[in-house]
Amino acid sequence: MTTTTADALLTRTGLAGRRRDPLFWISTGFLGLVVLVAAFAPFIAPYDPEAIDFAAIWAPPSLAHPLGTDQLGRDLLSRLLLGTRESLIGPFLLLVGATVLGVAIGIVAAWNGGWIDVLLARITDVMFAFPGLLFVVLVIAVFGEGPATAVVALALAYAPVIAKFTRSIALSELARPYVDAYRVQGVGGGVIAARYVVPNMAPALLGYLVVLFGEGLMGLATLSYLGFGAQPPSSEWGLMVQEGQDGIVLGHFGPTLVPGLAISAVVVAVNIVGVRLSERMGARA
Amino acid sequence: MSDVRSPLVVAHGLRRTFQPGGRRDPVVAVDDVSFEIEAGGSLGLVGESGSGKSTIARILAGLERADAGSLTLGGADRLVRSRGRQARLERARQVQMVFQDPYGSLDRRLTVEQTLMHAMRLHGMATRAEAPARVAELLDRVRLAAKHGTLKPHQLSGGQRQRVAIARAIAVAPSVLVLDEAVSALDVSVQAQILELLGEIRRDSGIALLFVSHDLAVVDEVTDRTLVLFHGGVVEEGTTHDVLRAPQHAYTRLLVSSVAGPGWDPHEVIGRRSAFERSRETFRPDEARG
Amino acid sequence: MTAPLLDIVDLSLHYGDTRILDRVNLRVSAGETVGLVGESGSGKSSTVRAALRLLPPNARLEGTVRIGGREVLAADARELRGIRSTEVGFIQQDPRGALNPVRRIGDSLTERLVLVHGVGRAEAKRRGLELLEAVGISRPELRFRQYPHELSGGMLQRVVIAAALTTEPKLLLADEATSALDVTTQAEVLAILRDLQRERGLGVLFITHDLHLAAAYCDRVSVMLRGEIVEELDGADLFTGATEPYTKSLLEAVPTIREARA
């Protein structure tokens, strides 16, 4: 009964804490807004993001251009809004791909042990020893540059990391007797892993994946910045930062600062929401 | 009981070794263990940790394989792999298990109802329409209120969780219920209620029990026959009453006299233990079995 | 007569409106073993945690707790650290939770000696090994280098007991310290504690759910129910002298091999 009382107390403070958690609601609201923008950007953007206007190069913020313009006189607000979709879908797909692959490998390694486990350990060791970006550049060198390759390359780079993390939490999850209870009932191993163990690990996994979403977003932006990911005239945020940097020496910070801040804001918001959500799921479970 | 029937469970010469990490020698967890359980009977397994009692329970429940020996239930071999999903499910259904940790052994995402329904539907024990009535019946049988059905494990007390675990086990009408330290984590008053419940279930449904416990007094309450294990081997077997009150083997005597009671002195227990360890040089468990 | 090692006077504990402890009084003197029994949720563990102020921030404490004559509830952070590190050894229920999983057993065992008490590493190791041996751990040199996950629960429990004894505290708070152990191992550990009590007057607060053990091992036993101490008895009288209905019902529920002891 100690545990029940303790749980009740925790849940109660958890609830109260959530109600009085403005950071969580601000972040959720912000991300909701970002998703809406991604969906409706073509309708709300004041200008064509690719419309060049040599009369308004590096224009400061004004009524006509609320965030100013870039080195080709393109409207920064419109570019930012339209870049949302490509900037968010990339990391999302990357995360989904890496998660499916990583979780599957991690669970199999934890469940079976043996050579699969050893192989996984070796692969992750190599991946950890090998600079991630270098691996990605290598993949791109083989398969050619472009947004799709960048996503696939990063997904392959993240999968072992997720697998290793999954393996570690799966090991303690599989040691819980409810797994044996399902086995005694005659449920097969694969079904237990997929239908019962993975959902029970979800809170811990979610917290981790959210951090990776932020990393993925930045990773893809970095690749675009280096010229391996999104290609001009796309307004993917990483590419915008790269294209805008010529202006910095001339004192025009807007074209780099605006997409840079957008990346940071989304990463921070996703982290806050993800951590709180995983806490919530953990408290309920 | 007057007619001569063959026992429900027959284990013969069970053996199981584990290979620890590194280049160390394999550990013999279960060494040539034989026993029988009558239909509706109850057998206690006692011994210290590492005596192999849990491993035997897990072999019977199908969670662990045996390296040698035979194990049959109602004449059917339980050590070979069953072919096909139906055969596997049917074999699993016959032996159900209740674990020590009542919280960990329940899926924490599922409500009590969901847990019970899952077990019944898996084994086709109830149609979708019948299931709610069967759940209500099961909850009643383990003395839980209907309102507990909608709760999740973390909202229940330890005793209630163990009742759910027992309900889940008997939901599929097994012929043997394996209890591995199933009341060790519970308070004495809750423990007494659970033991009473187990007695009732045994009386009403004729489910046989394999009861693993380090608590001799609890084994005394629940079981008819007892097997005393030491380092994986059986050192004594008999009716629980005789084994605990007139122990024959030196190790059983040590176990029984180590239990705290009036006049208990830790130094005396240690003295007896080391005397026993010394006597093992001449008194091997293998010979005692003879 | 010297001051008691642990003196809890009218200790109450609330979480918001929920009352966990209600005017608990407990006293442990040098060389004495005091049992604290009761069912889960009765407040046994909370009493110990409250006495050491190991509670979440929303806990509200009233009353007095003195450990070795030093006021605990009014102590500032530094004093509190001093009391915890020098006066008391604390053994928790869950040995796995009490040990850092990524540190070697030896490091966990000696860190308090080295960091807080300024004992040299070699000397700390010598004392640690000695204690491991004393609590019945085979091959202490090997265990010293191992990690918690490599040891069984019973073995870990003994490590935790050894760790609590490294700094030679005068008072030991043992929360179900031997419950996970086999009867003979339990006897080994309790024999060590009894020796320490005789040799240097160690006082022990012994929380257990095993009433037979409490009766056999403790000088005095306090029975808790819903945050209150309902009865206090001499250990030897626990099974015969109880007058409170709750204590009686608790004792009746205890399974016993009846004729065996006659």
Image (spheres, coloured by chain):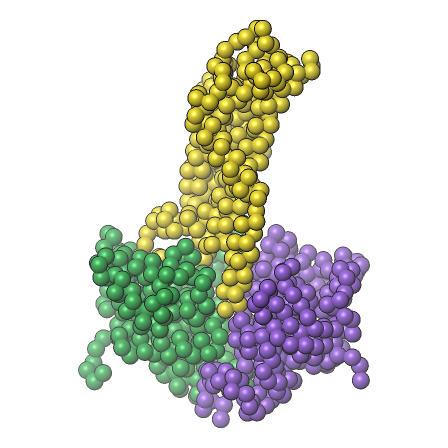
- Give the residue drawn at x 41%, y 82%: B220
Horizontal and vertical percent position of residue C119: 79, 60
Quadrant of res B175: bottom left
- Chain in yellow? A
Q: Nearer the viewer, residue A16 or B113?
A: A16
Residue with the most extreme top position: A54
- Give the residue drawn at x 51%, y 57%: A11
Does B17 sit left or right of C199 as displayed? left
Quadrant of res B141: bottom left
- The vertical placement of C27 against A201, above or below, is below
- The vertical placement of A135 against A255, above or below, is below
Instruction: Give the drawing colour for chain C.
Output: purple
Quadrant of res C139: bottom right
- The vertical placement of C87 against B218, above or below, is above
Horizontal and vertical percent position of residue A50: 49, 13
Horizontal and vertical percent position of residue C211: 54, 81
Q: Nearer the viewer, residue C35 or C153?
A: C35
Tally the marks. Answer: 0
Residue with the most extreme left position: B3
Q: Nearer the viewer, residue B74 or B119?
A: B119
Residue with the most extreme front position: A63
- Give the residue drawn at x 74%, y 72%: C67
Horizontal and vertical percent position of residue C202: 72, 76
Q: Is residue A15 visible?
A: yes
- Give the residue drawn at x 60%, y 10%: A57
Does C111 sit left or right of B163 as displayed? right
- Chain in green? B
- The vertical placement of B34 against A6, above or below, is below
Q: Is residue C44 visible?
A: no
Does A208 sit left or right of C205 as displayed? left
